[in-house]
Image (cartoon, rainbow, N blue to C red):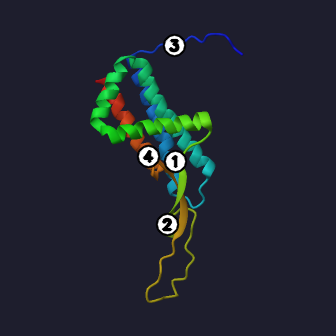
Amino acid sequence: MCKRKRNKRQIGPLEAVQKARHKLDLARFHCRELRNASAKNAVRDPLAIEAYLTAALGAGVSVFYTLHEGFGPRFAEAKRRLREEIGEVNDQFLYRMIGYRGEDVHLSFLDASYETEWKQPHEIQGITDSSSPAVLTENPAPVLVGLPVPILDRVPAYDACERFLEMLERLIQICEA
């Protein structure tokens, strides 16, 4: 067991905002990649989806705690102002998203599930519609392909991440004011 005490580096408000913005950019990158990995391809790689979701949540939570560290006691006022702006339902969502990241890191468990999304073949990369246009029927049924979509907090995970990141962007703005 290591008994050496780690020196904690202090950061001020200006550095905290810079670092928080950088982490927000990283979170947005991973959220975009999550959307791309989840929404467009016929072959969805569950490992890639989980990696992007984990990275987006981790970077987003870093925004929150970087601001907390840099603003110290003043951070409580920023959180209060955010809560007033976004309302109780969104505030609870914000903390659930932070909690999802904690469950993922500490328990290796993320409460995400999959639902089937039905799309026409031309809407999906990697699928070609080989049905013959020569076969005509009076009411042709459209051919649909079922794709698994990751769900977090009862919505597609990429939508949940984008909503989470919008709230964190607003928190940065409040801290800057």
- Residue type, numbered disc 3: Arg
Q: State which tag comes first along the sequence, 3 or 1.
A: 3
Instruction: Answer yes or no: is residue 26 visible.
Output: no
Tag 3–tag 1 contact (CB < 8 Å): no
As drawn, the label of residue 160 is: 4
User: Looking at the rendering, in which quadrant would you find the N terminus?
Assistant: top right
- Proximity of marks 4 and 1: CB atoms separated by less than 8 Å: no
The relative height of residue 34 versus residue 137 in the rendered view (above or below) is above
Task: Indicate the amino acid at tag 2.
Answer: Trp
Q: Amino acid at mark 4?
A: Ala
Q: Which mark is residue 34?
A: 1
According to the image, label 3 marks what residue? 9
Mark 4, secondary structure of its residue: helix
Residue 50, percent from left and from top: 58, 46
Mark 1 nearby-residue class (10 Å; few <14, some 14–19, many ≥20): many
Q: Give me the C-alpha separation between circle 2 and circle 4.
A: 20 Å
Q: CA distance from mark 2 to mark 1?
A: 18 Å
Rounded to the nearest angstrom, the CA distance separating label 2 from label 3 is 50 Å
Q: How far from the left and from the top, in percent, is residue 53? A: 53, 43
Q: Nearer the viewer, mark 4 or mark 1?
A: 4
Q: Secondary structure at mark 2?
A: strand
Determine whether 126 is above or below 171 in the image: below
Residues at marks 3 and 4, CA–CA distance in whole angstroms: 32 Å
* Quarter location, residue 7: top right
In the image, residue 18 above or below residue 119: above
* Mark 2 or 3, nearer chain start: 3
Labels 3 and 4: the sequence-earlier one: 3
Cβ atoms at labels 2 and 1 below 8 Å apart: no
Residue identifier under label 2: 118
Tell which of 116 and 162 is nearer to you.
116
Q: Are marks 2 and 3 in contact (CB under 8 Å)?
A: no
